């Protein structure tokens, strides 16, 4: 039976928060070593097969989602915890890291099936002798649903702290009006601002992983069932989302991060930055949901944000021009080249195509 586990590995206490490059390095190391695992020997020689995994690294550690094929839930947990501990010990740069948690998360159907195996008592692997106790509250916490009040308070505090890095947009850009008592409060506006900053950090981390994935495979995004960030971009161009494209888009997010920290925002630089802002918005909404922020008019707040961020720009026309070919097979790779060109240069190029008319009359 397949089981999905969630594990957390953390650095030693008092370790400074990991920056973007360090998080990318940790993700690469864990991903590389997990890829090498073809089979795990569990208790009593039970064979356990790793099927899939995903690594996500935060400033304070890493989360690993791991799918294993094991005869019983207890075997999956024990084997995974042991293997992760050994993996850290054998990885030179991670020898001081430890496994904080390694537990099975499963759908209702999987849990019911696991319980049925125990009740039947007919499993040759000995699953009938395993006592399974399911803590639903812990399961909710692992899956990010209905986290504890303390956990959500900590996440909201992190959003407030992150908002201090926002220089381009003040509270008014998120719907706060100090002259209107009915508008959202300044604190609520700063929560959303902080979510935008953290959303950008997560997007950058995900793009690092996508770059690595595409470089190793040598194939475009259209050849991959799952990617972290690139699959959120318009799918009709996925055949042209190469490793080089991913690197250029990663640079775009880095530039966006710098610009958001500066005052006097003057609009997006190019189409790629427009798309990056849209992806950041989606990531910000996820951060707000994880922090239990559900009673705010988020649609209106992000609408106000887009008015400040995009100005008079017709975003839909920029992303999907009306003159774009209807057949995806006719999509020109040069379209993606223009995504990274400043809007001013594109306008100048278009104006140069206009042929001046000589209105002089020769006698």
Image (tube, grey):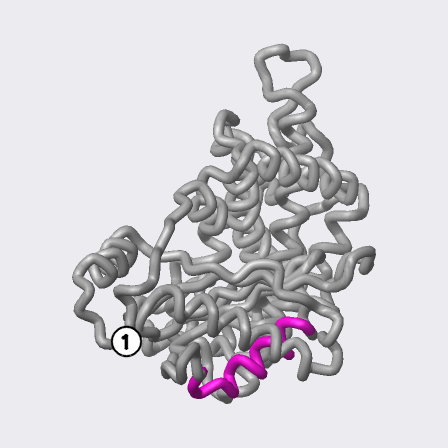
Residue name at image x 80 percent, y 42 percent = 263
Q: Is residue 347 magenta?
A: no
Q: Name the foreground residue: 350 vs 355.
A: 350
Q: Quadrant of residue 350?
A: bottom right
Q: Tell me if residue 312 comes above or below residue 173 in the rendering.
A: below
Using residue 336 as the reference point, say whether residue 223 is left or right of it: left
Which quarter of the figure is the N terminus placed in? bottom left
Q: Position of residue 343 (x, y in %)?
A: 63, 59
| Residue pointed to by mark 1 | 125
Using residue 236 as the reference point, say whether residue 152 is left or right of it: right
Q: Name the foreground residue: 253 vs 4.
A: 4
Residue name at image x 58 percent, y 82 percent = 32
Most distant residue in the front direction: 129
Using residue 357 as the reference point, say whether residue 45 is left or right of it: left
Asked if residue 264 can be seen in this view, the reply is no
Residue name at image x 67 percent, y 72 percent = 26
Q: Quadrant of residue 251?
A: bottom right
Q: Tell me if residue 239 comes above or below residue 189 in the rendering.
A: below
Q: Is residue 33 magenta?
A: yes
Instruction: Give the total number of marks visible in the rendering.
Output: 1
Asked if residue 57 can be seen in this view, the reply is yes
What are the residue bounds of the magenta stretch? 26-40
Q: Position of residue 297 (x, y in %)?
A: 50, 27
């Amino acid at each position: 039976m397949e089981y999905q586990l969630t594990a957390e590995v953390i650095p030693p206490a008092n370790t400074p928060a990991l920056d973007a490059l360090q998080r990318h390095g940790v993700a690469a190391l864990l991903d590389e070593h997990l890829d090498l695992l073809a089979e795990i020997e569990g208790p009593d020689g039970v064979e356990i097969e790793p099927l899939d995994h995903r690594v996500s690294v935060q400033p304070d550690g890493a989360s690993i989602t791991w799918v294993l094929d094991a005869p019983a839930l207890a075997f999956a947990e024990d084997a995974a915890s042991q293997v992760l501990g050994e993996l850290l010990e054998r990885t030179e740069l991670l020898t001081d890291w430890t496994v904080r948690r390694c537990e099975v998360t499963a759908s209702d159907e999987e849990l019911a099936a696991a319980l049925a195996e125990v009740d039947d008592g007919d499993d040759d692997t000995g699953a009938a002798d395993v006592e399974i106790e399911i803590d639903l509250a812990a399961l909710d916490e692992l899956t990010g649903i209905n986290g504890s009040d303390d956990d959500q308070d900590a996440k909201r505090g992190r959003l407030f702290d992150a908002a201090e890095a926002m220089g381009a947009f003040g509270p008014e850009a998120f719907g706060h009006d100090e002259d209107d008592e009915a508008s959202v409060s300044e604190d609520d506006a700063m929560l959303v601002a902080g979510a935008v900053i953290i959303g950008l950090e997560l997007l950058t981390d995900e793009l690092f992983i996508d770059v690595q994935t595409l470089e190793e495979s040598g194939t475009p995004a259209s050849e991959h069932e799952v990617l972290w960030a690139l699959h959120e971009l318009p799918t009709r161009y996925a055949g042209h989302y190469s490793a080089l494209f991913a690197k250029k888009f990663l640079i775009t997010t880095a530039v966006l991060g710098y610009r958001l920290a500066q005052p006097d925002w003057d609009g997006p630089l190019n189409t790629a930055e427009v798309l990056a802002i849209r992806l950041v918005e989606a990531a910000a909404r996820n951060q707000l949901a994880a922090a239990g922020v559900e009673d705010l008019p988020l649609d209106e707040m992000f609408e106000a944000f887009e008015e400040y961020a995009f100005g008079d720009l017709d975003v839909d026309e920029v992303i999907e021009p009306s003159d774009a070919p209807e057949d995806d097979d006719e999509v020109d790779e040069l379209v993606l080249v223009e995504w990274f060109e400043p809007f001013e240069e594109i306008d100048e190029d278009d104006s140069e195509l206009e042929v001046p008319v000589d209105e002089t009359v020769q006698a």
